Amino acid sequence: MAAGRGEFFRSFLEGLQRQPAQRVPETGQPNRGRGRPRPGGRFPGQGRGFSGQRRKERQSSRTGPPKEGSRRKSSPCKLNLLESLPSEVLVKILSYLDPSSLFCLSHVSKLLHQLSNDDVLWQRIYTSEFGSRNWKLKTSEKCVEGDDCLTSRWKRLYFKSMAGLELNKWRKPLKSINPYTGLPQQTEWALRSLNVSWELTLCKRLGQEHTLEQSQAHFFESSVIVHWSDGIHMKFHHITTIQLHGVRKEPRSSIQTRKPNWRSLILKLDTGGPFLVIGKDKLIKVLLLQPGVIVGVWRGKNQVAFIMISLHFHKLVEKSLLGSPACPYSEPVDLPPVDDVDPELGLHGYSLHFVLHNTGTEIMSGRFQQLFCHKAQIHRGLVELKVIQRSNLSQHRSLSGSIRLPWRHEDMQGVVENCCIMSLTLLDEFQKPFWCVSTPIHITMAKTARSCNYSGRDFQMLYRNADGEVKMLLVWLEEQKQFFLIGLTVCVPVAKVNKRFNREY
């Protein structure tokens, strides 16, 4: 296989290199190669049967193998006609290309690489994009010894300016932090202004792929729910992999200027793993595959009706833009703070922004500060942060409306009861995001006895994964037809705290 690829690239390179016409020693005339017929109207080697081939074999057996220093004569049909044109004509042709096409063309051959890096050509591109305010190159932009001097200095300056311009479009607005949520204040504005959407790719067992564009997107304080319902015509057990990509759609002024959109991989999920049924109604049942991924399946048919994914705002712009089509964006690792004065660093000063909502309305929202846990309270390898205590009536919160999750499939719609979305943002004592999650959660009957302070039935909502646990205790008041949140505990693994703050609790 490697030898075959080497032979192919060697032949391809010979075709790109200019080879002058060889002259036949006996006649002194140019050798026209095998493309010119003989006087009899036949090409060399053409005749009855394989006489031409046999004649070659007999001749090669007489002369023996070629010598090491001998060269193969190349025919004029292998000449690169593009290189026969004057450089001025080629540069004029290249001047009609856009920067991205010009950059791709520079990887075709050595000649095109040299011509596409013409300094005057890229200077015109730079001035047409940024004007003539920086028409002189700075000293730092000039080619120094050790750099690739074949690359145009104006080309480097153009891509450097474009990269800085693109990053400043969304990084400056994201510097402003919302004091209520602890997240960038203009995340929704940045996603909308950059024309970011999300695409879903469903992979079948036979390798077939089906790409879906989002149907709807519902934005909230700290998360967004993306919905796909149109064009899904496959059964759930036929799907092997679900891939979520962030897509930035460029404005299309005309059909001639259409370009492929950049796709950034956010999530790749294998559907062969375990899943949880979190709710159902008369038409569908709702499956939870992993945090944030909801699949609605028609009851009795096992066919997918809709797919919803809840995405937390933490680093969502970076995940949707800075990843590649095959590799997701990786967050930079922050160094642990150095503080030997505080013996309980990482066990106090937490803040929590907590939201319960569905696809249309907000059920409950709150911010809780100064959460702590003493060393003696670390239990089962978990740091427990008591947010709402059952014994403290002043901390209890009422939930507006019933807990339900609406769904839609083309012209059909319905509601799954006792299910909603939980968006959690836990900040450490330095007000940096420590644990962020947005996922569906459902209600079950509580195993404990009824609350002494309320005359109603007790329910619980439990969420657990490798990054932490969330335990909620609710009571249903029959007369008011309302839920009250009377208990909320957030638990994080002590190993995660030790790694973050460089401790050994």
Image: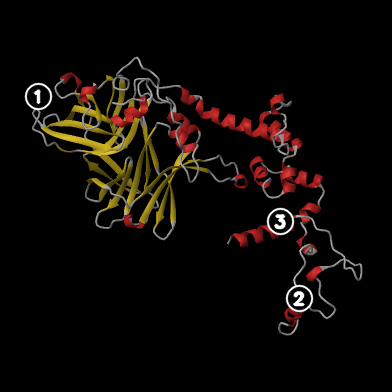
Query: Of discs 2 and 1, which sits in the foreground?
Result: 2
Amino acid type at mark 3: Leu
Question: What residue appears at the point 72 percent right and 40 percent down from the top-left corner?
Answer: 117
The residue tagged 3 is 13
Q: How is the image coloured?
A: secondary structure
Q: Position of residue 152 (x, y in %)?
A: 72, 36
Amino acid type at mark 1: Asn
Amino acid type at mark 2: Ser
Marks 3 and 1 close (CB-CB < 8 Å) = no
Q: Quadrant of residue 3?
A: bottom right
Image-based side of 83 in relation to 106, left or right: right
Question: Can residue 221 be seen by looking at this rendering?
Answer: no
Image-based side of 399 in relation to 210, left or right: left
Query: Of discs 3 and 1, which sits in the foreground?
Result: 3
Around disc 2, counting alpha carbons within 10 Å, would you say few (fewer than 14), some (14 to 19), or many (20 or more)? few
Q: Secondary structure at mark 1?
A: loop
The residue tagged 2 is 60
Pick whichever of labels 2 and 3 is earlier in the sequence. 3
Pick whichever of labels 2 and 1 is earlier in the sequence. 2
Question: Can residue 384 be seen by looking at this rendering?
Answer: yes
The residue tagged 1 is 453
